[in-house]
Image: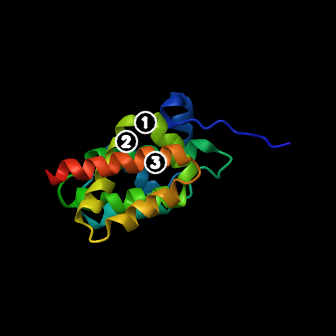
């Protein structure tokens, strides 16, 4: 018999659970600065190090899902605040998360429309600037193949974003 674990996101944990995980040492220290806004997000080496860590992290495979929830929450905070040069590279980080952790990412994006729209915009910017747009669309479909209907919805939304940008 297979045991299915319910996925919870950061906003679904109690303040006590959040406090415990942050103070436990289980969280990569620099990401705590993203969470508590003590770190200045920007086009700098430290932000890129944190983004590298958060986008290479394998979400959804840990028995303690609060760590997953914390990291995707931190990535989402960066995504919402990204502007200028940082904004221009966020599509690559979004794609990394989709490749590494597609099942978790699909669940997260289905539950967080604002973040799904940000993923669409940042990936759409990469498509818009690309000489090989179809390859990016193929990569997206491959990343999201666990949920074909979501994959098509997402790719269509990216295509629509690109079409709007070309006008």
Q: Provide the residue designation for mark 2.
A: 115
Colour logic = rainbow
- The residue carrying mark 1 is 112
Q: Is residue 80 left or right of residue 18?
A: left
CA–CA distance between discs 3 and 2? 17 Å
Q: What residue is disc 3 on? A: 152
Q: Residue at x 48, y 49 (%)?
A: 151
Mark drawn on residue 88 = none
The x, y position of residue 83, in whole percent, is 20, 52
Quadrant in the picture for residue 101: bottom right
Image side of residue 113 versus residue 101, left or right: left
Q: How far across and how far down the image is residue 126, in percent?
A: 29, 61
Horizontal placement of 20 versus 138: left or right? Answer: right
Q: Residue furthest bottom?
A: 131
How far across and how far down the image is residue 82, in percent? Answer: 25, 51
Give me the residue at 43% from left, 43% from top: 153
Query: Which quadrant of the figure contains the N terminus?
Result: top right
The residue depicted at 39 percent of the width and 56 percent of the height is 94
Report how many numbered discs are placed on residues in the image.
3
């Amino acid at each position: 018999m297979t045991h299915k674990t319910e996925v919870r996101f950061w906003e679904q944990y109690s303040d006590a659970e959040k406090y415990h995980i942050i103070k436990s040492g289980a969280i990569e220290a620099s990401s705590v600065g993203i969470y508590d806004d003590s770190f200045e997000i920007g086009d700098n080496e430290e932000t890129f190090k944190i983004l590298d860590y958060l986008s290479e992290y394998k979400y959804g495979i840990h028995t303690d899902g609060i760590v997953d929830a914390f990291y995707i929450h931190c990535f989402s905070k960066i995504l919402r605040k990204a502007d200028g040069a940082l904004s221009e590279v966020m599509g690559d980080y979004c794609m990394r998360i989709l490749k590494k952790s597609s099942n978790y990412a699909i669940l997260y994006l289905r539950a967080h429309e604002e973040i799904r729209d940000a993923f669409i915009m940042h990936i759409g910017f990469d498509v818009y600037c690309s000489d090989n747009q179809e390859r990016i669309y193929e990569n997206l479909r491959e990343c999201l193949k666990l949920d074909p209907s979501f994959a098509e919805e997402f790719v269509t939304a990216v295509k629509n974003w690109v079409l709007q940008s070309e006008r």
